Amino acid sequence: MIVEKLIELCVWLLGLVVTVIPFPGPPDWLTSTGGAFASVFSGAVALGVWFPTGLVLAVILGVFALRLSGLGVRIGRMVLSLFTGGGGNAGG
């Protein structure tokens, strides 16, 4: 009950500060990043002749898939150790 009132007071104070102090808008370079990303990606596509982006993406996705499957095996071992009373070394 006391913690809830403290949180409500902090939220009220934050709302008061936000309404009283005038904050400037975000700068243009932050709101218009589409042009910067487009130029970076167009430059990366142009490097496709010398840099095998398809192969690199396949390797990154393969590593991610292997890491995810390892995580699944680890979680499975932890769940199974709950049923066996923790007889194995599932944590590490």
Image: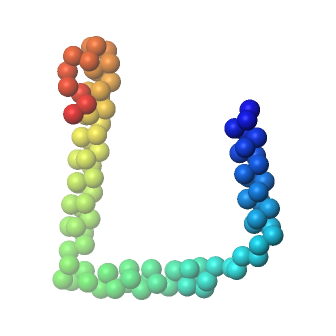
Residue name at image x 21 percent, y 33 percent:
92
- Percent x, y of residue 10: 72, 51
60 relative position to 16: left or right: left
Q: Nearer the viewer, residue 21 or 79?
A: 21
Q: Quadrant of residue 19?
A: bottom right
Q: What residue is shown at x 76% (from left), y 57% (from top)?
A: 13
Name the side, left or right, on which 80 lies relative to 42. left
- In the rendered image, the vertical position of residue 82 relative to residue 56, given as above or below: above
Location of residue 55 with respect to 32 vertically, above or below: above
Give residue 79's quadrant in the image: top left
Count the numbered circles shown.
0
From the top left corner, tell me how far across and down residue 53 is, in percent.
25, 72
Residue 81 at what x, y percent from top left? 27, 20
Asked if 66 appears above or below 50 in the picture, the reply is: above
**Toward the viewer: 82 or 70?**
82
Left-right relation of 32 to 68 = right
For the point 76% across and 76% down, which residue is it? 22
**In screen coordinates, is 14 left or right of 57?**
right
Q: Is residue 46 above or below residue 66?
A: below
Q: Give the residue displayed 80% in from the left and 62% down from the top.
A: 16
Quadrant in which residue 60 is drawn: bottom left
x, y percentage for residue 32? 57, 82
Color style of the picture:
rainbow
Q: Which quadrant of the figure contains the N terminus?
A: top right
Instruction: Looking at the picture, tell me which residue is in the foreground, 51 or 78.
Output: 78
